[in-house]
Image: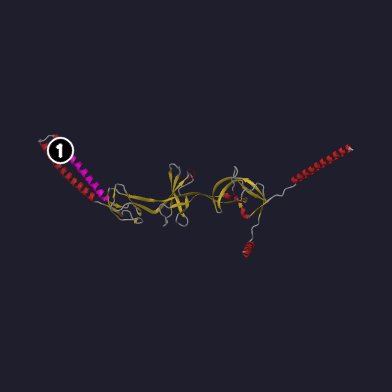
Amino acid sequence: MKRWHKVSLAVLLLAVVAAGVARMVSTRKAQQAQAAAPKATAVLELAASDLLPVRRAELTRTLEVSGSLVAVNSAFVKARVAAEVKSVAVREGDSVKPGQLLAQLDPVEFDWRLRQAEQQAQAARAQLEIAQRALQNSRSLVTQGFISATALENAVSTEAGAQATLQAAQAAVELARKARADATVTAPIGGQISQRLVQPGERVPVDAKLLEIVDLSRLELQASVAPEDAGQLHVGDTARLKVDGIDGALTARVVRINPSAQPGSRSVVAYLELAPHPALRQGLFARGSIELERRPALLVALSAVRNDQAQPYALRLEGTRVTQRPLELGARGQADAGEAIEVLRGLDEGDRVLAGSLGAVRDGATVRVAAPLSAASAASTASAASAAR
């Protein structure tokens, strides 16, 4: 009886193990079948605006510049003599012409110096006349044998010294006359007074700044250009500038390029002359771009170029799938549709690429482009939205 129970227990145990093994095999087969079954492919929905065309268009290469406006002709009027300022005839904003009276320094001291120099010149002239008469007498006496040749030579030297003394005195008169004239300050150039730095009653030293004159008829933008861009600039290049406080763009032209780089920054200064405008002022800040080149090229929007890999690439739409295309790029600039870049290799004219605003899209992804709304559909959609409100 006990032996029968042992056999029954063994048979039951074998049946349980066999059932477990059968279930395990069945589960594994189901998993393999599920893995072998084709997965449903996700489709990326695109709007027509998400695709950017590759096309041939005119590429305009520009160089961004900025800087302050500076008058081509400006001058600081300085005191040529040390004196007290007697009067100043102009103020900031006044227009002046070349040679116009600007200020008057006190001339009393220079009048007396001029008179002193003139009197010294008269005394020197009198001494010269005495020396000349003595020389004439000495020559007569030498011919008669009353004096020696040495005495005649002394008379000649005395006359020459008196002549030199007179010439020095006359030069002193001219210097005193010039100092008297320098007490009257006149405009060296035409323009407008931008600074008045002295007031009547002040005593100024030599070379003290009195006034500043600015000629606004010709203004330039002094723009610092990086060394790698300076070689692309040429005299005559045109630019469009936006000046603070002035509506609209102004036209400018490169008239000079500095042959030396600036210490420290190593930048090169380019000078752009602006067309006359009544609102332009020295010191205003301006920014804009210089047109370097304009030529046809195969272009793609700059936003479509992706740079998250070692080589730039674009995602080209081929039927309903997206293909990653490595790119060889050229010059960057402006086109009629915005900022663009030249494609040298990797895309063809007529291709459509995904905009960069879509974010990351894997190579080989399936996409579907939604048809654009017709005018009637757009109008009905707008009406329905208005009614819902």
Q: How many discs mark residues in the rendered view?
A: 1
Residue 110: horizontal and vertical position, in percent?
Answer: 23, 49
Q: Count neighbours of disc 1 (C-alpha within 10 A) and say few if under 14, some if 14 to 19, many if 20 or more.
A: many
Name which residue lies at 24% across and 47% down: 176
Is-magenta flag for residue 67? no
Residues drawn in magenta = 156-183
| On-image quarter of the N terminus | top right
> Which quadrant of the structure image shows residue 387?
bottom right
| Relative to 380, 225 lies left or right | left
Name which residue lies at 45% across and 44% down: 268
Return the residue found at the far front: 2
Circle 1 sits on which residue? 155
Name which residue lies at 18% across and 41% down: 162
Residue 61: horizontal and vertical position, in percent?
Answer: 52, 49
| Relative to 15, 123 lies left or right | left
Q: Which amino acid does label 1 sit on?
A: Ala
Return the residue found at the far right: 1
| Relative to 138, 221 lies left or right | right
Magenta span dominant secondary structure: helix
Residue 310: horizontal and vertical position, in percent?
Answer: 59, 42
Return the residue found at the far bottom: 387
| Viewer-proximal residue among 18 and 131 | 18
Residue 14: horizontal and vertical position, in percent?
Answer: 84, 39
| Viewer-proximal residue among 236 and 276 | 276
Element type where label 1 sits in the image: helix
